[in-house]
Image: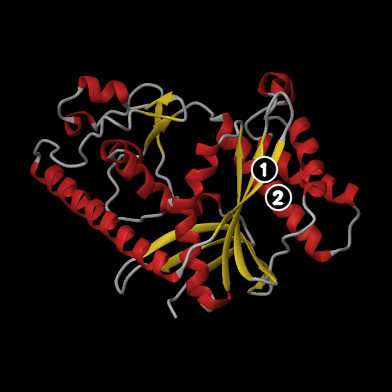
Amino acid sequence: MIETDLKLDSSKMSDYMRCPRYCFYRHELGWTSSRTNKDLVFGESWHRAMERVSIDLAEKTKSEKEIVQDAMIAFCDYYRQSYTPDTDMENFPKNPGNAELAIKQHLSAYQELLIPVRIHDRWATEIFGTVPINSSRVMLFRIDKICKLDSGYIFVDYKTGSQNNAAYQSRWQLSMQMLLYYHVINCMYDPKQVHGGKVEMTLFKKGGNEHLRIPINKSIDMMNEWLFTVNSWYDAIEDDHVSLLEAVEKQQPLRCFKRNDSGCAAYGKICPYYDFCLSWSDPLSKIDTIPDGMIEEHWTPFKQMKEGDIHIDVETK
């Protein structure tokens, strides 16, 4: 079923920028693989472990051993919903045993501890909400953590990966996701007191884990330029979305969400909708039947929201 409401977050917009047709299949139709995605399951498990670490460090009541234990409980509560212990060797290095090692390494890797601030009388981890990008538009977001250092307020985003190279590290500097988070904290606080963000990257590799902190720093002029850019992309998605609804209503062929042949591969993998683009001249004639191996699941960052997480509708200052 096609989504009638346009609910944009950084993931949807980035997917559209990669390939509008990819965005059509993934977000307008909600088609996604029915197979469990190990990287996504592990990544969300790691987020939950790091949230627990942040809260325990902020409360200063537990030993390092207890902090690791708490983090692993949070990790396994989510991870074990998808994977049983007999799969752990097969899933190495992204498995609970190596996650526990990485948590211990994380605690000793950095001299500067990033302690969350308080929002709505709780530690500012897992903040979900909306933020305006102009007078009539908002975007959805999920920020892993907001902290205050001597230099000012920062956001923190946890990433997991398996390779370390300059290209991979550089991509975060202009990432739609990171600049949306930057915009959020610029709206929440005085921009003069905002000092950007940090990507806390943990690389899980068979030869040993790595821990990186990648700083994200932008001037006000750069953020104003980003606002122009993000609204331009919003215009394009909105136009395609309206055209799509009209085409469905009038039973016309798809003449929007065009293909981008430069986006057929990402992260070394072929697009999951590649065969559809090869075979179908009019995808709208195929939407009544979900293809084998796929399910319908519409993405929103709020899907990962847990009881007790912060929800905030940010206003511009």
Identified by mark 2, the residue type is: Met
Helix, strand or loop status at disc 1 = helix
Helix, strand or loop status at disc 2 = helix
Which of 200/90 is in front? 200
Query: Is 190 placed above or below 201 here?
Result: below
Q: Picture quarter containing residue 59? A: bottom right
Q: What residue is disc 2 on?
A: 50
Give the quarter of the figure containing the N terminus. top left
- Residue 111: image location, x then y, percent: 80, 55
**Residue at 33% in and 24% down:** 291
- Left or right of residue 311: residue 117: right
Q: What residue is disc 1 on?
A: 46
- Residue 50: image location, x then y, percent: 71, 50
Residue 70 appearing in the image: no
- Residue 62: image location, x then y, percent: 89, 57
Identified by mark 1, the residue type is: Trp
> Badge 1: how crowded within 10 Å, few (<14), some, or many (20+)?
many
Query: Is 239 placed above or below 228 here?
Result: above
- Residue 123: image location, x then y, percent: 69, 66
Residue 134 appearing in the image: yes
Colour mode?
secondary structure
Which of 35/39 is in front? 39
Cα separation between marks 1 and 2: 6 Å
Give the quarter of the figure containing the C terminus. bottom left
